[in-house]
Image (cartoon, rainbow, N blue to C red):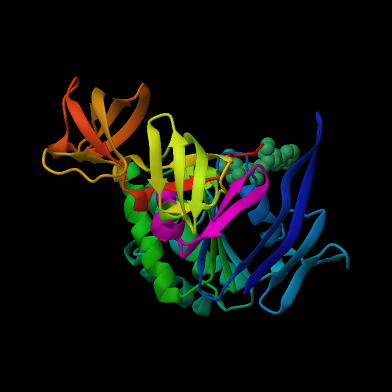
Amino acid sequence: MLEATDLTKTYVTAQGPWRAVDNVSFRIEEGEFFTLLGPSGCGKTTTLRCVAGLEMPDAGRIAIGAQPVFDGAARLAVPANRRDLGMVFQSYAVWPHMTVLRNVSFPLEVHGASRAEAEAGARKALGLVGLAHLADRPATLLSGGQQQRVALARAIVRPVRLLLFDEPLSNLDAELRVQMRAELRDLQQRLRATSVYVTHDQEEAMGLSDRIAVMRAGRIVEVGTPDALYLRPRHPFTARFVGQAELMPARVLSRDGGAALVDTPVGTLSAADSLVEAGQEAGLLVRPEHVELLDGGAAPATNTLDGRVLSVAFLGKLADHEVAVAGHRLRVQTLSTARRRVGDAVRVHLPPARCIVLPVDAGR
Ligand SMILES: Nc1ncnc2c1ncn2[C@@H]1O[C@H](COP(=O)(O)OP(=O)(O)OP(=O)(O)O)[C@@H](O)[C@H]1O
Ligand SMILES: [Mg+2]
């Protein structure tokens, strides 16, 4: 449905050229909710603006459905207003001198609908975002969340091929953000609109997306479903950025099929999934929430270590522990009801099935 191939965008700055998007390719299926996720400055907005036609790439190709909308080699660039897109930005961007209804009906009139048709269409879109009752209010007399819904209604009021979102929820307070996230997902599933969403918030990306592209420094590092990126990251940057994790330095001693035995600061460990060959330096991923603190009784023979609790942070539902194991600080997260005390001696188990050996991060 949307295909971007070898997209590159360089900005000219006072410090010289800056490659904001560096050879980015991705492909999105019809009806899919696809997210560009990455830290600030990694090129998410620039990529989205290239798709929208608001930014002119240096090179590459973009096709929406069967229509090429940009082709650097062929010098083709379809203007933004002819790409048939709906966009929602971080700033609410409602038109302040108009009512809610006019804010949403106006785009339809611009595209040739009569006033009556436009208003009927706008009322339907407002109904979809739960604002029908506020249609006649001046748009500025709305809360942030309501203004963002107006922007959303405006983006979906015409049938568009593609919806583009650039951090649309980041100006909302935490509670509203979570509520709007659920509504957005619900709306997208009802409309089956193909969507490209930009955020630096990994929880938001996981909660909304069918697939996520993890970006760093102008490039896509890895693309996958939320649970694949979380449970089976193939790149150390993904491991740290999607969910939390520090990678332990490790050296692969032997590798048998996908599994490996690795030497780490806490001793020799067994990992079910290794992307690294024997003899190589690597990073061992075990997420803090996958590490188990054992209570007495028989302990598993492999990957069980003795440690002492250095610190405990109560986080409400969960508790974060720092556990000293062989002089190394290991992070362990448990339900707070199962939390230990500072100074407790504990047996720590790192389930081999949850241990992934990843290459050393050679990133910029
Ligand atoms: N108009 C511009 N001129 C020069 N450099 C720019 C311009 N716009 C963006 N950049 C630079 O390009 C890089 C990518 O910017 P972009 O806005 O795409 O990042 P982003 O991933 O959306 O970040 P954020 O999460 O902070 O919004 C950044 O280093 C930024 O400073
Ligand atoms: Mg941005």
Residue 80 lies left or right of residue 359; in this view the side is right
Q: Position of residue 96 (x, y in %)?
A: 51, 50
| Quadrant location, the N terminus | bottom right
Q: In this view, does 146 lie above or below 308?
A: below
Which residue occupies the foreground of this view, 359 or 113?
359
Residue 336 sits in quarter: top left
Residue 339 lies left or right of residue 287; in this view the side is left
Which residue occupies the foreground of this view, 187 or 237?
237
Residue 359 seen anywhere in this rendered image of the structure = yes
Residue 222 sits in quarter: bottom right
Q: Give the range drawn in magenta.
A: 202-228
For residue 169: magenta? Answer: no
For residue 223: magenta? Answer: yes
Q: Position of residue 56 (x, y in %)?
A: 78, 55
Q: Where is residue 316 in the image (x, y as percent from the top left)?
A: 20, 36
Residue 149 seen anywhere in this rendered image of the structure = no
Which residue occupies the foreground of this view, 5 or 325?
325
Residue at 46% over, 41% down: 262
Residue at 52% over, 42% down: 252
Residue at 49% over, 36% down: 250
The number of numbered badges drawn on the structure is: 0
Residue 295 sits in quarter: top left
| Quadrant location, the C terminus | top right
Residue at 19% over, 43% down: 299
Q: Position of residue 30 (x, y in %)?
A: 55, 76
